[in-house]
Amino acid sequence: MSKMRRKEAEPTVAKRTSQPWIKADVRQWKPEVEGTYNIDILPYTNPSCEDGSVFVRRVFNVHRNIGINNASFVCPRCVGKQCPVCDYLDGLYEDYDKNATEIKSIKKRKQTAYNIINPSNPNEVVVFAFSAFNFSDTLDKEIGKQKAVFDARGEEPEFNKSNLYYYEVTEEGRTVQARFCEAVLGKQAFLQADRVDFVPRQSLEGSDLLSQVYNLDDIFNVPTTKEITAMMNASDDAEDVVEAVVVEQKEDAEDDTDAPWVTGSDAEVVAEEKTSTEEAEKDVCPFGHKFGEDNDSCSDCDDCDKKVWKRCFNAN
């Protein structure tokens, strides 16, 4: 594929509007200003899972800065489909040193989506979709610290002895109290959770809120291969230049139920193409992070050996 056409990014400031890659009829929330927010995370079920599994969050990836119009959209690989950008990236990785700048600009960025009670309206459920680096990583680290205490004792965490089951709708559930502060990376400002605490909450059993939760596997606008290719190849004078965003996936598109869902200990759903487990286990992050999971979510990633980084990326 020829080099993708794109223009230089302009200086930006924090943009905290609703995510365009989520369907228009999905109510959304995200923090608008610095401060501490009480976030009540609610579990959901996916009707396609016959075993009745309960899930807490949906991990997905986003591509940005695609083509001359700097388009952004959900990576189709998250729903088990082909992604022309990822295919293009596979070629760029063959000479990482030469293509490092472009790779870092358009590579997939990990995000997480949750069903939460609207912090501004306790009678409404909304979707909180945010950069994993700026929220869920902080939540996971705090959960990891608490789990380590029980592991050190050789004990299994129990509802009434930990905050690990924060998403429970019983009285054992917890409100996630997250403090968001403004951070700056390069020319871009954004909000980032730098502290997470857990606060007891009343039982939500029988609450009407539980009937409002979204199936987080069905909230995304996913562009087709043809639409992505048009974004990648758009030019300034093209009559049909594709403006930023995304096109809702058509109902008659190929079935996406074969996406490789993986259920974790916190009932997280991960929809990513992964390398084989045996191959992934051979690698260890040289900086002590989770190989195949924390790719490009840590500051150390920029200093990682390019071959190790690529294997970690492919395992993600």
Image: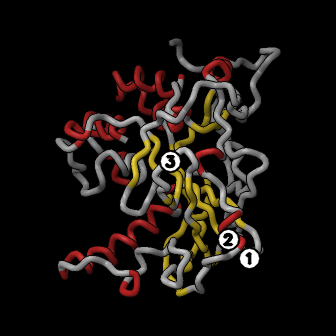
CA neighbours of label 3 inside 10 A, class few (<14), some (14 to 19), many (20+): few
Residue 299 in the image: above or below residue 204: above
Instruction: Give the quarter of the image for residue 17.
Output: bottom right
The mark found on residue 117 in the picture is 2
Q: Disc 2, disc 1: CB below 8 Å? A: yes
- Which residue is more in the foreground, 55 or 232? 55
Q: Secondary structure at mark 3?
A: loop
> What is the CA distance from the residue labelled 1 to the residue labelled 3?
29 Å
Instruction: Find the distance from the CA under tag 3 to the CA under tag 2.
Output: 24 Å
At 58% from the left and 69% from the top, the residue drawn is 41
SS class, disc 1:
loop
Mark 2 and mark 1: Cα distance apart in space? 6 Å
Identify the amino acid type marked 3: Cys
Colour approach in the figure: secondary structure
The amino acid sitting under disc 1 is Pro
Tell me if 26 is positioned left or right of 159 in this view. right
Q: Earlier in the sequence, mark 1 or mark 3?
A: 3
Residue 144 coordinates in the image, percent (x, y) = 34, 70
Q: Which one is in front in this view, the residue at disc 3 or the one at disc 2? A: 3
Amino acid type of the residue that numbered disc 2 sits on in the rendered structure: Ile
307 sits left or right of 94 in the view: left
Please tell me the numbered disc located at residue 49.
3
Foreground mark, 1 or 3, reads: 3
Residue 122's label in the rendered image is 1
Q: Residue at x 50, y 47 (%)?
A: 49
